[in-house]
Every structure is written in C-alpha cells, then in structure tokens.
Amino acid sequence: MEYINPPQKINYKEILEKSFCFAPSKYSKFNPKKNPKNIIFETFGNLIKCSEERMDINPKEKYFYIEIGNINVNNGGIDLNQKIGLRIPQKRPLIVKKGYILISKVRTYRKGIGYVNSNEENLICTSGFIVIRTVRKDITREFLYSILRHNFFIEQILSLQNRGMYPRLDNTTKEEVLIPIPKDKKIILEMTNLTKRIIENENRIKINFIQINNIIEKEINENQKKEKFQYSLPNYNEINEELRISSSIYSEEYKSLMFLIKNYERGFFNVDEEDIMSGSTPKERIFGKGKVWVTPTNITKHGTLNPEKIICRKYNLSKDSLLIVNRGREEDVGVCMFYDYNLFGEGQHNQGIYRIEKFNKKDLVLMACLMNSKIYRRICANLSLGSKMDEMKTKHFSMLPFPKFPKEIREKIFSLYYEGIIKLNKEIVENQNKLNKIIDNLVKDMN
C-alpha cells in the first residue's frame, strides 16, 4: 500500500499487547511524524456526529430507499430508487437528508461512501450505513467527504482487517482512523469548493442523462407503425430457433420492448456480429501508470469513464469506439460509453468489455445513449444469461435493433451527451485529480 505497510520488525511487548496474534494488519498503521508544521491529525470519531434517527415504514407509502449497492464506488454518486414500503426490507430504516454523508460499514474499503445531494421526501437508508449528520466547526462536510474517498482513508480501513474477516468501519474502529486537518484554512476552503463542484457536476450529469432517456422514449413511443403488440406464449418453433429455455426472452416485457423498437416507423438497424470485438488483459503490464485502462467497473451507468492507467506493449483502443460491458448484475450488462479518442488517446480495455469501431462518432454516441436508456437496460436484463453472473455474447448484441432516429433527434442527443455528460465528467476527473494531489501533499509532506 502507498501510505500504510506492515513494520519490518516487532518487539515482544507489542506481541503481548496483541495477544500473540501475528496478523500483519494488527501491526500495520499510519504513523504520522511528531509535531508536523502544517497539519494536525485527528481521529475520525472526534470530527463527526452521526444520526440514528429512524422512520416507521408505511407498507402503502413510497420511499427513496438507499442500499449499499446504490452507491457508485467509482465516484460516490447515489442512485435513488423509489420503492413502496411493502418492498423495503427494514421496518425502521435510518432517515437521510441532503448534505449527509453515508459510509458503508462493510464495504468501506471498496469506497462505499456517498454524499446525499437530494431534497426528496421520504429519503431513507439501510442501517448498514454510518450516517454522518454534522462535522466539527473547523472543517466542512465536503472537506471530510473528499478525505473519506481518498486512498489514504481506505488504506487505513484495510489495515484494520483480521484474517477471515472483511475490513469494516464501526464504533470501535472510528477511533483508530486518522484524518489530516490542514492548519491553513485556505486549503480547507479550496478542498471544499472543489468537492462542491464535483458534486454539482455529478448532479447535472444525472439531469442530462434523464433528459436523454426521456427524448429516446418519447421519439420511439410517438412514432410507431399501425401494428399493435399482442403477446403470445412461445411455441416449439420459437424455442427451437432461440435454442434457449430461459423464460426471460419469452416474457411479455421482453417481447413488448423488442416489438416497440422494431415497430418504429423510421426503421432500425443491427450491428453485425463480426464488428463486435473482444478486449483482453495483457500478460505483461504495469498498472497505475501509462495510458487509459478500462474495466467494467470504470464505466458508469451514465456512460462516463473513471479512468485508470496501464502500461503494455500494444493497445486495443486506437480510435473512437463504443465500449459495452458484457457481464455483471442484470441491468449492468450492456451499459455503454463512447470512448472519445481525442479526449482519452490510446488505451486498453479488458475482456469484460466489447468494442465497436465501425460507425461514425455521432452514431456511436447515439448507440451508447440507447444502450443506457431504460428500454435497453430491461431488454439486456432479459437477454443476458448466466449462473454466477449475467452475461451477453456477441451474438446477443447483434440481435439488438437500433432505431434510425431523424437528424434533429440525433443532434439533440449528441449535444446533451457530449456537452452535458462527457465534458462535465472530464471536469470532474480534473477536479478530483487536484483534490488527490492536495491530500497527497497533506499526508506525505507533513513538515
């Protein structure tokens, strides 16, 4: 790890204090220098006040219920899904409000840490979160949030791990984790403003994403041929043709959505299977440096990229491309992004992603937006198959029909995606890099 490593040697007294446990995590911790000039280290527990306020659930009422899986571990964004009370697994979940910070107790080390940026009523979350309501007056919630999502905090959580157990954050370990507080208040203000811009841009991306989805649904639904959908159960010939007995592709939902696209009055097109290429993880590579490295977890449902770095001999991303996640959990399968070569340059994507290069830039953007829309998320969820995880093969993607939208709709979608999602995400990445550099300097240059 970068900030925390096991000591080279331990003494007998330490072994006694640890009850003869030799787990490296028991002796690994961050040891700040004594009396640094520019920074103070405070225990995490001393900086926060948590909320335990709960809500009694009405089975008939609707709520926005946040579970651990609703936090995007790449950027801290929180996906809000509305559920009726009857479907909420907890009778008295925690109440959440705008500005609260949510920290997963069991997935902290995976950056299951999110900032609530919604004023929705009936906003609640699972008790699997630590809910931070307020912070000490000499810092801000945004400042603390930026530290919590940095690797310095995550490595401290990982160092608390015992063999056979997940590293977790609870009332005990809150007092073992350190937070760097700069003595210069201008640094706190700068970090606060950078974090606010990141949170605001993430919110604008969500709004633009919803707008794109609404344009897609409106265009398809309002421009149907005269034929009407009629559902029928599968017959022998249909099953023999599909060579699948899984019920999802014979469901009314799947058939009605496929009909909706194929019945679009301006027609549709398919991608030839031979134009869908697989990725690979190079045998010889160095992670953390070099050019862009894309894995399924780097691609968000909004079609943005949280890039990592890789050095290898040859790269498979050398032009504008559509990148498609081909495996994951149900509606994650088929999530797409447009890889802008002018923006990212050369890069490499692994075998969990398919690549399409054949089409022009605007067509690739349109296909990315369609694949990320609600209609296609449900189509892919039904079309994918697998036991350990859901997956789609190249032949499944070649089955997908893409509507031939008119020029004005294509231009509108392209502008919203490129200007209102891609460029905003670029700004987020730049601001996050600035934040990371500031925090690195705080932690490493303590004198």
Image (cartoon, helix red, strand yellow):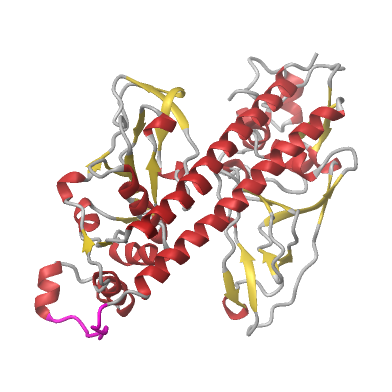
In what quadrant of the picture does the C terminus appear? top right
Residue 228: say if magenta: yes
Residue beneath the point at 77% across and 32% down: 190
Residue beneath the point at 51% across and 61% down: 211
Image height check: is 63 above or below 31? below
Residue beneath the point at 53% across and 48% down: 420
Q: Position of residue 16 (x, y in %)?
A: 74, 27
Residue 104: say if magenta: no
Where does the magenta region start and end? 225-235
Quadrant of residue 397 within the rendered picture = bottom left
Report the side of 271 relative to 425 (left or right): left
* Residue furthest to the front: 408
Camera-nearest residue between 347 and 89: 347
Image height check: is 313 above or below 267? above
Q: Position of residue 435 (x, y in %)?
A: 67, 31
Report the side of 82 relative to 258 (left or right): right
Camera-nearest residue between 50 and 332: 332
Q: Is residue 121 visible?
A: yes
Quadrant of residue 34 within the rendered picture = top right
